[in-house]
Amino acid sequence: MDYGKYKYQRNKKVSKGHVHHTKTKEIRLRPKTGVHDIDFKVKQAIQFLKHKDKVQISVVFRGREIAHVQEGHRVMASVVEGLMEYGKVETSPAQQGRRIVCTVSPK
């Protein structure tokens, strides 16, 4: 039997019962990220959620930005608010060193 033909037939059988495996996608932001850029990242995250992927949102602090943690929480809150229609918060925003991390899973 032709191995190429065998491989092709096997792939066709696998693709019929296609099951989407959930992946975790990450969106990284900074505390000084502008409103338009945040909106763009939210749109990307919505596409991930529609595709049944989890989204991990990270607000990363560099250098002296860590002194303004409230700005990071503000950015995180605006992103989470934009994603509430398409997903639910799996892990609430928590600070881990120089980052604030939150995970949103699809509805």
Image (cartoon, helix red, strand yellow):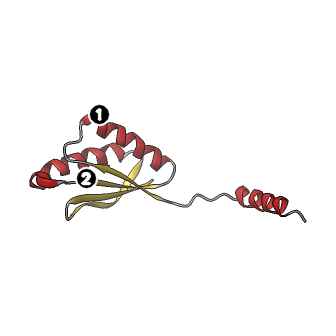
Q: Which residue is drawn at 30% across and 37% down?
A: 37
State how far apart marks 1 and 2 are (Cα). Answer: 16 Å
Relative horizontal placement of residue 76, taking residue 83 as reference (left or right): left
**x, y percent for residue 46:** 42, 44
Q: Which amino acid does label 2 sit on?
A: Val
Q: Give the quarter of the figure containing the N terminus.
A: bottom right
**x, y percent for residue 78:** 26, 44
Q: Quadrant of residue 101?
A: bottom left
Q: Residue at x 48, y 59 (%)?
A: 23
Residue 48 numbered mark, or none: none
Q: Which residue lies furthest to the top in this view?
A: 36
**x, y percent for residue 84:** 35, 47
Relative horizontal placement of residue 31, taking residue 13 as reference (left or right): left
The local crowd at label 1, few if under 14, some if 14 to 19, many if 20 or more residues have their Cα within 10 Å, is few
- Label 1 or label 2, whichever comes before in sequence order: 1
Asked if 40 appears above or below 91 in the picture, the reply is above
Q: Is mark 1 on a helix, strand or loop?
A: helix
Asked if 43 appears above or below 80 in the picture, the reply is above
Q: Please name the residue that numbered disc 2 is placed on.
A: 59
**x, y percent for residue 31:** 19, 47
Q: Please name the residue that numbered disc 1 is placed on.
A: 36
